[in-house]
């Protein structure tokens, strides 16, 4: 692996949110190093996606602090958080279904493409230059997942796995410092999952970003995550390296144990 | 002043009765039934023909008008809206507009565009309290509105059919799985809404006695506004929205400008929606991320 | 690069269709083969084509339902008439006056679009639709009470009646409340109308295939994902809405300057709906479809003149049937099977 950068990029302290009288997430703390891959696991309904929604300000937190690259994101909205450097994918895939694959990536590149409405309408030189640049950039990003040949396909027509990969590419296009992946391996077969694992590592190394992922596939989580936080009923019940988590009795009881029984 | 208030409540009661139809249909079919206003017009014409041409007494004439509109409502739903249950809301909206044109033009062919003078169906003496004079039409309208409100609330909350209706509006598929006949429930809703439109038609034409094929459209749009105003899908909301709209309209006419009264009504609607984006009594539905 | 050329080809086909339409009717006109009623329809056809394009930008591309676009059309129409009439003696070249009228009509409609868009676009779905409807009615209502006159001192405004304009003798009343604009000099021409159609097509097509247009479509497809990509939702919704309002205003000016009188009632809810019908029947988001639908459906009532009373009835039935057939899978299947049968039969007969 390439050189490690251990300075924290994302620091979350005492994060919490209440819906009505119900506390969905409470006292959530996590610190992510600059090029760390971390996992967030826990049984269904534990509040994992809610944490992503808090980090990206889809919900405004009731309590706590989120510091991204030494900047407090307090008061920012979803759009500003993305511009500040957090990008995400969604558990229930959210692509721009009627746009092409390439255009989906170009939406990710939107804030890094610089020409205005009038240059677009009157096809000024700026339009041609910037469109050429973003076209090349989009293809380059798609090539991470070998998807450059699908550039002209409609996003909604892609198979499930390809849609999940496209969401990752789109998120990457926004040039994030922290990438949040919500169940990236859901619906993938074991070989696809293995490939995805490789690609997540590759992305981290190439772009030098931190990755926080929610996943139920334990092979993936244990295989690539350097740190893992386990969530149950909105609270962290354990934190540590994969081997520490695997041997934590509380975790086994709350999550892994149940899962084994279910199988 | 008090006279204006009574007039406002009376006009508002008509809007409320129409708005109830809009809101019930919206609640269950999630569609804006633009043809609802034209059902009012049909109700008016049926009552007009039976009393003026056939010389029927008022009560059977009104009952027949209600019956005709209920059947019309069911037929419209079965023929035009049912095939589109899976379609986009825009497609349904356009179809509803088509139905509205259809009803207006059929009425135009049968009754021509010459306005008919609607006979006053409420031939009771006015109520006089001191200086205050309340016309019998206004009184009957307000009483009818209150009765309808009470009956509808009891119906949706206490009866089995009413509960089925609420279940269908909440989740069609789940209701179906629970053994509720969804099609019958939707038909029933359209029947009730259209029956109410007939009552509103008679009351409206008694108060404003000109009847034309386009009579229903403006009250229809305003009642629709009232339904949104109160929070579309909510029965008490439609009631509240209708009555407030009537009061605002009458006061706007009296104190600000007759010509600008519609602009005032719609401005108030916009302000309310900006402050409360789902209307006065509407509930907010958040998209799950 | 392949992708760009594909959308570019589609754009050029659209320009081609408009030009062929123009040449065809221009030849028909000059050889006198066109009936009076049809030649009188040429500018209205162009107007409705432009309106359909404008509304498609909001409904199809931006994905918001507007039921009040006739309001913007009327803002453009009346401001255009005021400009054209007030400048009658200053600028004698009528094409220049027409251009000025259209530009000012568009600008004022854009202002109205901005004022309306800022509050309205915060709402979603049916609520947005009802508020645009309300605004359309408000605009109509206000114009119904508006009186504007011109004399040597300039323009005079009143919301009461024509007498309170306080004009010197010899001043002309341009807009007379519910009677609308009177004594308009007809300066719109078919060629000007076609040029405006081409300009509008150029603007919308190029916008749609650029960074801003992509953003507008992305917000339509998935608002939450668009936010997560850092897109400024309000900015792009406003862009589509205001641009659409401006185009509707230009269409209104073109339309009004084709008649000697125009009343505010002309631009009511029914007109908004009519344009929406063009957009829906032409295929939501499909510019070529809305142009064709607008052209055919504007002429159709003229062609059905012999059916007089029945034509609107037929129109209504056709509208309902088309919606059911295009949106119901069973009806589609049935139609497909019937079609296949007929095809088979004719194939057998041939064989």
Image (cartoon, rainbow, N blue to C red):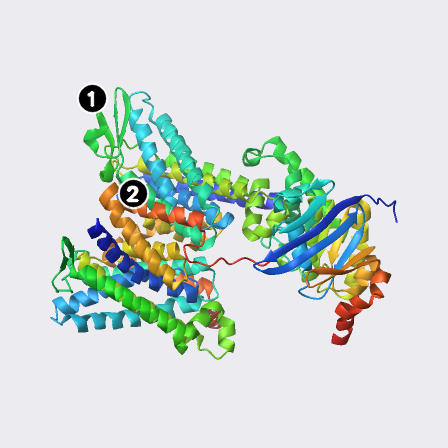
Say which quarter of the image contains residue C33.
top left
Q: Relative to residue B214, is residue A41 drawn left or right? A: right
Chain of the residue that carries numbered disc 2 in the rendered image: C
Name the quadrant of the N terminus of chain C.
top right
Up/down of C318 relative to C4, above or below: below
Q: CA distance from mark 1 to mark 2?
A: 28 Å
Q: Is residue A163 visible?
A: no
Q: Which residue lies under the disc numbered 2?
A: C141
Mark 1 neighbour density, 10 Å: few (under 14) some (14–19) many (20 or more) = few
Nearer to the camera, A139 or B120: B120
Residue A162 on image: x %, y %: 70, 58
Q: In percent of the image, x 21 and y 34: which residue is there?
A: C161
Nearer to the camera, C187 or C9: C187
Q: Earlier in the sequence, mark 1 or mark 2?
A: 2
Q: In percent of the image, x 33 and y 41: which residue is there?
A: C139
Helix or strand or loop: what does disc 2 sit on? helix
User: Disc number at residue C168?
Assistant: 1
Q: In percent of the image, x 62 and y 44: which residue is there?
A: A79
User: Disc number at residue C82?
Assistant: none
């Amino acid at each position: 692996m390439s050189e490690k950068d251990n300075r924290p990029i994302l620091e979350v302290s005492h994060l919490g949110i209440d819906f009505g009288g119900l506390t969905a997430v409470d006292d959530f703390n996590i610190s992510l190093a600059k090029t760390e891959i971390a996992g967030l696991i826990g049984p269904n309904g534990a509040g994992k996606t809610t944490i992503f929604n808090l980090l990206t300000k889809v919900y405004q937190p009731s309590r706590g602090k989120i510091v991204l690259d030494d900047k407090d994101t307090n008061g920012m909205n979803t759009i500003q958080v993305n511009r500040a450097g957090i990008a995400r994918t969604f558990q229930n895939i959210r692509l721009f279904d009627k746009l092409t694959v390439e255009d989906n990536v170009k939406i990710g590149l939107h804030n890094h493409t610089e020409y205005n409405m009038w240059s677009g309408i009157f096809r000024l030189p700026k339009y041609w230059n910037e469109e050429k640049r973003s076209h090349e950039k989009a293809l380059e990003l798609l090539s991470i997942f070998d998807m450059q040949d699908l550039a002209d396909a409609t996003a909604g027509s892609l198979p499930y796995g390809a849609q999940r990969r496209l969401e990752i590419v789109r998120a990457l296009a926004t040039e994030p410092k922290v990438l949040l992946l919500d169940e990236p391996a859901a619906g993938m077969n074991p070989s696809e999952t293995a490939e995805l694992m490789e690609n997540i590592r590759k992305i981290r190394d190439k772009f030098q970003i931190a990755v926080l992922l929610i996943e139920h596939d334990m092979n993936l989580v244990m295989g690539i995550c350097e740190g893992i936080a386990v969530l149950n009923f909105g609270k962290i019940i354990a934190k540590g390296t994969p081997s520490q988590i695997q041997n934590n009795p509380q975790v086994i009881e709350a999550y892994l144990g149940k899962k084994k029984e279910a199988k | 002043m008090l006279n204006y208030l009574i007039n406002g409540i009376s006009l508002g009661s008509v809007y409320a009765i129409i708005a109830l139809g809009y809101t019930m249909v919206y609640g269950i079919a999630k569609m804006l039934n633009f043809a609802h206003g034209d059902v009012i017009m049909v109700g008016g014409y049926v009552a007009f023909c039976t009393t003026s041409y056939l010389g029927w007494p008022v009560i059977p004439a009104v009952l027949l008008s209600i019956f005709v509109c209920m059947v019309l409502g069911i037929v419209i739903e079965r023929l035009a809206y049912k095939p589109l249950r899976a379609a986009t809301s825009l497609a349904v909206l356009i179809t509803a507009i088509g139905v509205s044109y259809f009803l207006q033009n059929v009425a135009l062919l049968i009754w021509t565009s010459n306005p008919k003078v609607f006979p006053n169906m409420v031939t009771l003496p006015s109520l006089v309290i001191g200086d205050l004079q309340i016309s019998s039409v206004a009184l009957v309208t307000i009483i009818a509105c209150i009765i309808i409100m009470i009956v509808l609330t009891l119906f949706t909350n206490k009866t089995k059919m009413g509960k089925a209706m609420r279940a269908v509006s909440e989740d069609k598929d789940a209701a179906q799985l629970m053994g509720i006949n969804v099609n019958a429930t939707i038909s029933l809703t359209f029947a009730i809404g259209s029956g109410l439109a007939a009552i509103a038609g008679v009351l409206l034409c008694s108060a404003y006695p000109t009847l034309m094929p386009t009579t229903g459209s403006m009250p229809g749009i305003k009642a629709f506004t009232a339904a949104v105003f109160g929070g579309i899908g909510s029965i008490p909301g439609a009631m509240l929205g209708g009555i407030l709209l009537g009061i605002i309209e009458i006061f706007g006419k009296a104190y600000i400008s007759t010509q600008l009264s519609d602009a005032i009504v719609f401005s108030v609607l916009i302000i309310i929606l900006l402050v409360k984006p789902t209307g006065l009594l509407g509930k907010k539905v958040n998209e799950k991320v | 690069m392949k992708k760009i050329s594909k959308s570019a080809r589609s754009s050029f086909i659209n320009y081609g269709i408009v030009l062929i339409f123009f040449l065809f009717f221009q030849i028909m006109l000059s050889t006198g083969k066109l009936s009076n009623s049809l030649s009188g329809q040429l500018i209205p056809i162009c107007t409705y084509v432009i309106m359909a394009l404008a509304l498609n930008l909001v409904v199809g591309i931006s994905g918001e339902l507007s039921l009040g676009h006739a309001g913007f059309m009327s803002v453009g129409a009346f401001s255009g008439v005021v400009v054209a009439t007030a400048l009658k003696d200053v600028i004698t070249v009528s094409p220049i006056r027409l251009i000025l009228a259209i530009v000012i009509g568009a600008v004022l409609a854009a202002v109205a679009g901005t004022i309306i868009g800022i509050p309205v676009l915060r709402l979603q779905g049916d609520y947005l639709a009802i508020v645009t409807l309300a605004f359309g009615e408000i605009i109509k209502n206000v114009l119904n009470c508006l009186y504007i006159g011109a004399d040597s001192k300039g323009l005079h405004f009143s919301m009461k009646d024509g007498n309170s304009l306080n004009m010197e003798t010899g001043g002309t009343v341009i807009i007379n409340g519910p009677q609308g604009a009177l004594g308009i000099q007809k300066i719109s021409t078919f060629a000007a109308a076609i040029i405006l159609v081409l300009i509008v097509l150029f603007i919308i097509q190029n916008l749609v295939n650029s960074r801003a247009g992509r953003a507008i479509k992305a917000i339509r497809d998935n608002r939450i994902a668009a936010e997560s990509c850092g897109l400024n939702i309000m900015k792009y919704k406003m862009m589509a809405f205001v641009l659409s309002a401006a185009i509707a205003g230009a269409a209104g000016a073109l339309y009004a300057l084709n008649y000697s009188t125009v009343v505010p009632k002309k631009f009511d809810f029914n007109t908004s709906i009519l344009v929406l019908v063009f957009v829906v029947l032409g295929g939501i988001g499909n510019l070529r479809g809305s142009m064709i639908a607008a052209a055919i459906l504007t002429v159709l009532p003229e062609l059905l003149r012999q059916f007089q009373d029945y034509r609107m009835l037929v129109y209504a039935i056709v509208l309902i049937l088309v919606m059911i057939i295009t949106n119901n899978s069973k009806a589609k299947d049935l139609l497909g099977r019937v079609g296949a049968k007929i095809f088979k039969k004719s194939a057998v007969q041939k064989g």
